[in-house]
Amino acid sequence: MIDVDTRSICAGDVALLALLATGLTDRCVARRLHLSVRTVQRRISELCGTLGAGSRFQLGCLAVHHHLVTIDVGGDSGPDGVEAE
């Protein structure tokens, strides 16, 4: 795995990554963060470049690997305790 400088990733990006890591769609992430779907897609693309990810799935995995987000593997609910849509 390549060395990545995660200092450029802001709190808003971490929130997006946390929702992405739970398996939510771009539309659901956008709704929860009060952003447009296009903005979410653009940020995902930029974060893929920053972390060296080739896909949304790999982005979520790399976010966990770099300790940007943690995931609860014990339940079926999202970060707010709400089932994924």
Image (tube, rainbow, N blue to C red):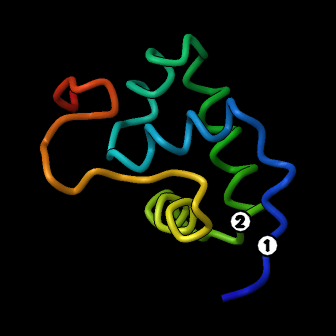
CA gap, disc 1 and disc 2:
6 Å
Task: Mark 1 and mark 2 in contact? Answer it, CB < 8 Å.
Answer: yes
Viewer-proximal residue, 74 or 35? 74
Direction from residue 81 to residue 53 in the image, left or right: right
Corner quadrant of residue 54 = bottom right
> Residue at label 2?
51
Quadrant into which the N terminus falls: bottom right
Pointer 2: residues within 10 angstroms few (<14), some, or many (20+)?
many
Q: Secondary structure at mark 2?
A: helix
Query: Residue at image x 46%, y 34%?
Result: 26
Q: Is residue 23 left or right of residue 76?
A: right
**Residue name at image x 75 percent, y 49 percent:** 46
Element assignment for label 1: loop
Please give the name of the residue rendered at 62% of the width and 69% of the height, measured from the top-left corner.
53
The correct choice, above or below, for 67 with respect to 52 in the image is above
Q: Nearer the viewer, residue 77 or 40?
A: 77
User: If the image is split into quadrants, where does the C terminus sit?
Assistant: top left
Dot placed on the residue nearer the N-terminal end, 1 or 2:
1
Residue at horizontal 45%, vertical 44%?
A: 20
- Identity of the amino acid at label 2? Leu
Q: Which mark is residue 4?
A: 1
Q: Of the residues shown, which amino acid type is indicated by label 1?
A: Val
Q: Is residue 37 above or below residue 20?
A: above
